[in-house]
Each structure stands twice: as structure tokens, then as C-alpha cells.
Image (cartoon, helix red, strand yellow):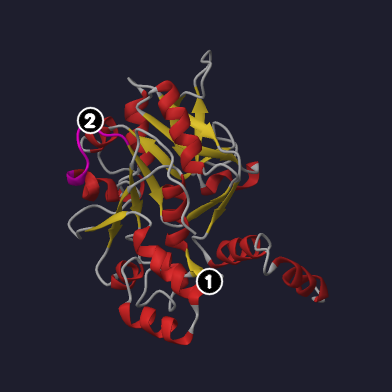
Amino acid sequence: MTRARLKSSVTKAVIAAAGYGTRFLPATKNQPKEMLPIIDKPIIQYLVEEAVASGIKDIIIVTRAGQTTLEDHFDSHVELEHLLRFQGKEKYLREIQEIPQLANIAYVRQKKHLPYGNATPLLCAAPLIKDDESFVYMFGDDLVQAKVPAVKQLIDIYEKHHPAAVLAVQEVPWEVVDRYGTVHYKRGTRINQIDRLVEKAKPEDAPSNMAQFGRFVFSYKVIETLRKTPTGKDNELWVADTLNRLAKKETVIAQPIAGKWLTTGDPLNYLKATVEYALKRPDLAEDFKSYLKSLNL
């Protein structure tokens, strides 16, 4: 499970995990959506492992009240370790002992007085980020299957061009662009620089079919700009609105990611992601393929 850390100037990440997961009720009544398993590992652990494989050492997870199961997952479980050792289940013992050692993890609660929105967790984490520090921002329900971790791809672009922000994008079918924030690229630039993001535009109004998803590398300028950004659509605090303000005077890059973006934000896409990961598992893939072929669909 544990992978070698890569040298990087970006060593801190913020993961947003403060939602209520209402589309998964009643399963999320007493547990965060990010703790739902993809096979035998919770969604949030895939994100932490991606960050660690990209050189991240310190992780801030922004949570809400009632999410102690998430915090417990990344802590030690002495009784379980003792039981597994007694039963001789060394493989499982090693796996759970490695989890608390993945990274230095801190937790910050998202306060109710703050506006709702996908940028709000950044306000919560801001006191733990230095004003000269760059950091990764990850949405807690987006996964990426890639040979080079998506976070690492963004860090490489950030360290090459030193923009104010880098966001991950991937091409989506035109008929579904109204589900996403899509980017308008600046003309005449040799890098993937943008002048604006448009949230959930109709296909005829969308600037492109390159959709933003939950991977970013931010300079501290993003936090400074966010503090001056008013709430936008649906009275929410949007990352897109913050980046649009920043892009007027700074370089913001929308970088296509090599890999497969899998969202887990609703039951159908969660099931699709589970299938995709099962088909990548050497211990499951062949039997699972045989099962899928046997279904009379």
C-alpha cells in the first residue's frame, strides 16, 4: 500500500469531506459519503494514497459534525491489531497498520455559519496554510485512475510554470456539459491558460466541453481571492467564481489529465466506479468479468 514519496515543493493537501451525502441516504445517515467502500477500501483512502504517491506529506481533511468514523479510519485500532496478530492474519495486520502512517493528517470542522459551496472548505483550512505556501485541493468524491497520479501531473505543471492555480480538466460529451463547470481557454497562449470557468452551462452556451473536476494546485493567492469572493449561483461559494476573479490578473491553467476520472457523487456513478476498480484488481478481475458476461442483460 505505502508508496515512495516524491520530492516536491508542494507537500500539503486539503481534502473536502464536509458534505451530507444526501443522495446516498440512508447509508450516509451516520457515516460520511467518503467512507463508502470501493470494494474493500473507503473512497477517502484512495484520495489520501493518491496525494501521498504525489509527494504530499501533510493532509488537512475538512469534515462536519458526526464524521468520527472518518477520523477513526486513519487512526490505529489496537484491539483489532491484537486480534489479527492472534489469528495469524498478517496480511490484514500490515494493511491496517500502514493506514495511520500514510501521512500527517489533521482535521478541521466546517462551521455552520459559513456559506455552503465547494470553496468553503478552503476557508476552514486557511489558518493551517502559510501565506507563502502552495497546496493541493481535492474534492472528496472524485477518483482518478492514472499511471501517473492526477495530483502529481498537476504539481508538475505548477512547478514548471508557477501559475496562481492549476485545475484538472477532462473532456466530456457535449450533451452532459450542463452537469459541470467548463473552461474557456485564452487564445494565443502556449500553455492551457484560461480566462474563465462557466458553471453548468447549457451545451449551446458552454465555452468548451473540457470539464473541471476535483483536483487542483493552488498558490496562497487563491485563498486571498476567495476571501473577497461573494457567494454566487444558488447562494453558494464556488471555486469557479474564485478562479474567474483570479484569472483576470493572474495565470490560471486548466490542465487535461491523462487517466480516467471517476466521480462517486451519486449512486449510479458510484457503482460505475466500483466496477472500474474491480476490473483493475488482479485478484478479482477475471472472476468478475466472467460474472458480468454471465448476466442476461
Q: Residue at x 35, y 52 (%)?
A: 15
Mark 2 surroundings within 10 Å by alpha-carbon count, few (fewer than 14), some (14 through 19), many (20 or more): few
**Residue 128 belongs to the span the image colors magenta:** yes
Mark 1 surroundings within 10 Å by alpha-carbon count, few (fewer than 14), some (14 through 19), many (20 or more): few
Mark 1 lies on a secondary structure that is loop
Provide the major secondary structure of the magenta segment. loop
Is residue 103 or residue 195 the one in the foreground? 103
Q: Residue at x 34, y 21 (%)?
A: 250
**Residue 269 belongs to the span the image colors magenta:** no
Q: Amino acid at mark 1?
A: Asp
Q: Position of residue 90 (x, y in %)?
A: 49, 75
> In 3D space, how far apart are the residues under numbered discs 1 and 2 (Cα atoms)?
38 Å
Is residue 222 or residue 219 the one in the foreground? 219
Labels 1 and 2: the sequence-earlier one: 1
Judged left or right of residue 110, residue 144 is: right
Q: Give the magenta-colored segment's residue range.
A: 127-134
Q: Which residue is mark 2?
A: 132
Is residue 12 or residue 212 the one in the foreground? 12
Q: Amino acid at mark 2?
A: Asp
Q: Is residue 135 above or below residue 87?
A: above
Quarter of the image where one finds residue 134: top left
Q: Which residue is mark 1?
A: 40
Mark 2 lies on a secondary structure that is loop
Judged left or right of residue 210, residue 129 is: left
Q: Position of residue 95 (x, y in %)?
A: 46, 68
